[in-house]
Amino acid sequence: AWKKYQTKGFSTKEEFEKDVVRHVETTLARSMFNCDETAAYAAASLAFRDRLITEWNRTQQRQTFTDSKRVYYLSLEFLMGRALDNAMLNVGLKNVAKEGMSELGFRIEDIIEQEHDAALGNGGLGRLAACFLDSMASLNYPAWGYGLRYRYGIFKQEIVDGYQVEVPDYWLDFNPWEFPRHDITVDIQFYGNVRKYQDDKGVQTAVWEGGEIVKATAFDVPIPGYSTPTTNNLRLWSSKAASGEFDFQKFNSGDYESSVADQQRAETISAVLYPNDNLERGKELRLKQQYFWVAASLYDIVRRFKKSKRAWREFPDQVAIQLNDTHPTLAIVELQRILIDLEGLEWDEAWSIVSQTFGYTNHTVLPEALEKWSVPLFQNLLPRHLQIIYEINLFFLQSVERKFPKERELLARVSIIEESQPKMVRMAYLAIVGSHKVNGVAELHSDLIKTTIFKDFVRIFGPDKFTNVTNGITPRRWLHQANPRLSELIASKTGGYDFLKDLTMLNKLEQFADDKEFKKEWQEIKYANKVRLAKHIKATTGVTVNPSALFDIQVKRIHEYKRQQMNIFGVIHRYLTIKAMSPEERKKLAPRVSIFGGKAAPGYWMAKTIIHLVNSVGAVINKDADVGDLLKVIFLEDYNVSKAETIIPASDISEHISTAGTEASGTSNMKFVLNGGLIIGTCDGANIEITREVGENNIFLFGNLSEDVDELRHAHTYGRHELDPNLTKVFDSIKSGTFGDVNSFSALIGAIEDHGDYYLVSDDFLSYIQTQDLVDQAYKNQDEWVSKCIISVARMGFFSSDRCINEYAESIWNIEPLTPEDGN
Ligand code: 26M
């Protein structure tokens, strides 16, 4: 029905070509005679961008006129990847563009490849935010994302002599997908002092004064929904110096050098994404980034609310704010400050508004990732906010004391301020106290936070405040865009592309799990995807891999808890086994390609050592003539969203092998299964729910359970710790120098042999290699294997981020979709 409102703009290939030529000749000021692929990409993007703008404006008007409740998704990371392909598919004009570009002499694939990834995120958390934006728009929810416009995204990874080298990712040279809003700026204050005074009526007021001001400028990115009239907005803030304001007063007028230095210091705030994933390091600049972004976003949200002229108590009926982990927790304090210091509300009324507005999503239980800020650092940077935090804490602890009168230790345990040296602000506790709902991201994870790190808070607030929303992924990017042939095959059997809007429709595929013709097509598509990846491997590493081999893939951030070290030890074990075999025995083996990819945080030395080991092992195995095609080891450089789109559809088996209880959810597990690959994994995160959906026969689970982890760790520390003999053999071969310098890898071995094997690599090793043998056996029966893959895909409907967003909308945000029928 909304189609009748559809915008002007091209809809045929001729019209598209006209737009492209116009942009080449006028916007880019070039002639069609020297239009290269870069220019063609630019012009095609501008043509699509024009088309998005009308719907974007209309969506915003609709949301304003109907005065409907909006959700604001606050995330320091949005791992968007490429925009052009996504825009073409979402507005349903990729074929038009393909034909048009072809007539202009370009292949659409080459044009798409020109785009630099928007890589404003580290890993799972950032990519989840990007999937959520796609789902919120595709489901017509009135929703905005708020983030930071980093000048440098996550670093580019180069592998030099087997080691990771980081190269800056300057991505803004040409970015047609953002609109600078130089008229939308906010002054953000840092440092300074708080002066308290009483007015004539004896009312205390706090004034935050002095310090310095930095300007936030908005940059807007349109977010088109798939086949919907909704185009939502992602607003990213960029920092610059507030020129001519009082921050310059402290310099002598005409002191040019220090003015420039000041300018640069201000611009530093939005300069670079912190490249840590699941690690907190307490740097002042990081806290500055957080406040800068949170204060600008809240100013914007509050300004929009005030235009509606509603009473403050209606704020939570108009506004839901979701905190993507604790990174935006300052928003809670900032809204309280706005309401009491600037708008003159009473504390209690303000606090009730604040705590009804926010929801907090936890993404990790790793202790080293839980955010804490030193009180002295806080005091210096945000003096007024620290006062407010102390008040919040005081009222909170008073309420706890009333409820649990004689439990002094409880008060110390749940205090937002940790009484350490120096004292620390516990951001997760602040987020819980200031939100109406707290959720984990998979069932096991949500249970774990309720019984471990947030246990006391469940007693205090009751169990209903804590809930689960299992993560999901957008099928538009992770099936339709990444695997167009599989998407087409599915469409041909399920009655068109409706399954992209209702992924549970995949269940119609189950009836074809034994259909010969269907299975043949399915296999052909997988093979073609593997050929494509093999070409990429050849081009980037020089290694030839056989596309008929079993492709075994582990791509994700490198972290000890994700256990890439166990994977590579397993590869070495396989290598030693092959070496010990007779040629006849070798003939019975299933050839395998072990593929790794992922970035290590630049300061995470152990993770970098894992990368070095993978490359060193590959260097030896890949040129061993005894082994040949039976085993190849590949490390793919610079894993990112666009590379994931080629890697994931090419997997036969992928690895999700974290120590039980450590991976909150995982989302690549869902992407791999949705693309017709099976997985080997531990009983962790969403693997458990994937098993529930696809059935135990269609997944390779192994290893200890999360409830056994504490005991095993305890036994390592206090009992004898005997290593698995298979693992010992692997260590012996490393120690004998098979893979180069022995000392390079001693820390990796030492962590297991001498330092308690915290991630239980040895405990799970036997079960891991035995399960890998089962994978080999299963792969030999291709007929059964393909049926397993089809059945699994058919049962993956639950893992759409659409399901996930509908759950948030209903149980946390209390918002409704909005379409033209409701407005303009
Ligand atoms: C912290 C401090 C300084 C700089 C960066 C950080 C930081 C950045 C990212 C800390 C944690 C970050 O992300 C955690 C994360 O990605 N968690 C993952 O979230 C996914 C989506 O819910 C889950 O699927 C993964 O299991 C979980 O590891």
Image (cartoon, rainbow, N blue to C red):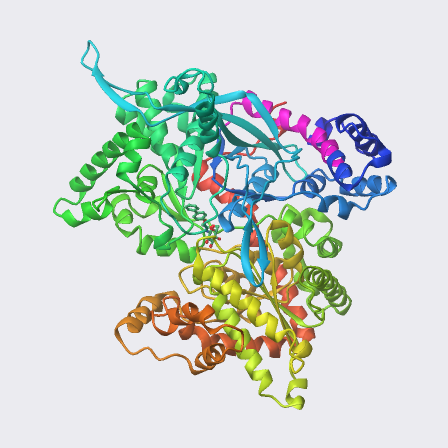
The total of numbered circles placed on residues is: 0
Query: In the picture shown, does residue 689 fall above or below 199?
Result: below
* x and y percentages locating residue 312 in the rendered image: 37, 21
Asked whether residue 301 is in view, the answer is no
* x and y percentages locating residue 179 in the rendered image: 61, 28
Left/right placement of residue 541 relative to residue 303 reads: right
- Quadrant placement of the N terminus: top right
- Quadrant placement of the C terminus: top right
Left/right placement of residue 669 relative to residue 756 reads: right
Left/right placement of residue 380 relative to residue 617 reads: left
Q: Is residue 46 magenta?
A: yes
Which residue lies at the image location 43% right of the left edge and 35% below the top edge? Answer: 289
* x and y percentages locating residue 565 in the rendered image: 48, 68
Query: In the picture shown, does residue 124 fall above or below 225?
Result: below
In the depicted view, which residue is nearer to us: 569 or 737? 737
Res 384 quadrant in image: top left
In the depicted view, which residue is nearer to us: 170 or 296? 170
Q: Is residue 498 magenta?
A: no
Res 545 quadrant in image: bottom right
The region drawn magenta spans 44-68
Res 91 quadrant in image: top right
Question: Secondary structure of the magenta portion, mostly?
Answer: helix
* x and y percentages locating residue 821 in the rendered image: 63, 27
Furthest residue toward top: 200
